[in-house]
Amino acid sequence: MRCGFHLRFPTYDCMEISGESRLTEEEAAKSDRYNHNSSMELFNEWLWRQEYWLPPGITWRDMAQMEDSPLPRDLLISLPLALGFIALRCAFERTVAVPLSKLLGVKDRVRLSVSPAPGLEAFYTKHSRHPAQSEVSSLVKQSGLTQKQVEVWFRHRRNQDRPSNTKKFCEASWRFVFYLISFTAGLASLINTSWFWDQRECWRRYPLQPVEKVHYWYYMIELGFYWSLLLCVSVDVKRKDFKEQIVHHIATIFLLGFSYCANYIRIGTLVMLVHDSSDFLLESAKMFNYASWKKTCDSLFVVFAVVFLVTRLVVFPSKIIYTTLILSMEVFQPFMGYYFFNALLLVLQALHIFWAWLIMRMIYKFLFLGKLEKDERSDDESEAEDEGEEEENQTSWKKRKVVLDSKLAMMTSSCVLNNLASQRANVCSRMPKSR
């Protein structure tokens, strides 16, 4: 209280008290920083315990003494690479993908514009794009429109927000270019390695295996690309397997990061090569699908389906997972990193089975229904397609009605003529008898 009353002219006692409080605050700040640093050190010690990352008998000191050893801080370069990929993608789509889409004849569907309705627009942007039946009833009272008009307004408004064929073509072409270059470069860097032909070589002298520069950049570029996909997931085309794609990207990032730190690089390069072998075929099939090149799209999809089913359901479990689960035990005893790495591989395999089921559904429709429908994983445009189907059904019904009317008219006229002819024949047959 005394210090409060004498703030303008403080006494010595007050200055002494304030000095003591200032020292106390400085000591408290130092103690907080010390506690924070100590907690961070404890966290780092817990996170980077060699029992988690390395097999028994190997320490981080052994890894540091090896030339060209993988270091965890090397992964930081993947973040600026991801930003570079995003910038490169924007430039690619504007300068290459859009002109290519026009050259191949990609056409965007004409979307019907909605009439101005501030109340409906506010509900659409703030609450929900799919109003419930009770909400539709309240919107009818607020807007003064009929229930059918409100439902049509929301359907057309959703269609306006759907991505155009040009946007989808640009996204598919960007991924096609990256996967094709990545697969070609990865195959060229691995074709002469010993572990490409014999997977037991992946564990020879593990983990004391130096990393070649080409495989280091192969890892960093792939990791940066998947970071860019994860960062752009909110603006990319949302497909039916949107959640599965998120799980796939996160699992892939964790798999690449952990495998690099634990020096699972040899087996990691094979995992990336197996995945890239079919991805560029799928993206090329999408490109021609958006361009309405149906025969080319169908042919590419058949090739993709064969490659996908062979690499993801045969090669991946029999070569990759078998190598990491069984053959690696010939070199070291199981440790935490062994279980974590194989768990991520099994997550990827579960996603492979899910996508293989979708592909088999398409193949079934192609074989037994006689047509190859669009990709089951493609973006969900069911409402727009339903609207187009309704219009097609209406027009086809009108055509059928005209044909039926004409046939009925012909049948009626023919029946009348037949009746007249029969009556005339009867009259003619009766005339001789009457005579």
Image: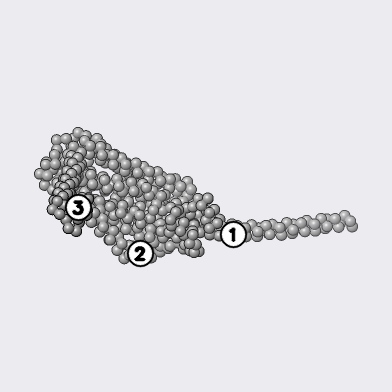
Q: Is residue 179 above or below residue 35?
A: below
Question: Which element is circle 2 on?
Answer: helix
Residue 131 location in percent, x, y?
49, 52
Instruction: Single out the residue that lies furthest toward the right.
Output: 435
Q: Where does the image place residue 67, in percent across and percent down from the top left?
A: 11, 47
Mark 1 or mark 3, whichever is nearer to me? 3
Q: Nearer the viewer, mark 2 or mark 3?
A: 3
Tag 3 secondary structure? helix
Task: Tell me which numbered mark, 2 or 3, is placed earlier along the sequence.
Answer: 3
Q: How many marks?
A: 3
- For the question of whether residue 246 can be seen, the reply is yes
Query: Which residue position holds label 3?
Result: 3
| Disc number for residue 58 | none
Instruction: Quickly name the residue at label 2.
Output: 98
Distance between the Cα atoms at labels 2 and 3? 73 Å
> Counting residues from the N terminus, which is met first, the one under dot 1 or under dot 3?
3
Q: Is residue 256 left or right of residue 391?
A: left
Q: Residues within 10 Å of mark 3 (few under 14, many from 20)?
A: some
Marks 1 and 2, how far apart at CA: 38 Å
Closer to the chain start, of discs 1 and 2, is 2
Judge depth for marks 1 and 2 and give the one in front. 2
In what quadrant of the picture does the C terminus appear?
bottom right
Determine the image quadrant of residue 361. top left
Residue 330 visible? The answer is no
Using the image, tell me which numbered label, if any, was put on residue 399: 1
- Amino acid beneath label 3: Cys
Q: Residue flagged by tag 1: what amino acid is it?
A: Lys
Can you give x and y, in whole percent of width and height, for residue 236 in the image? 36, 56
- Observer-nearest of 359 and 95: 95
- Crowd band around label 2 with a 10 angstrom C-alpha radius: few (<14), some (14–19), many (20+): some
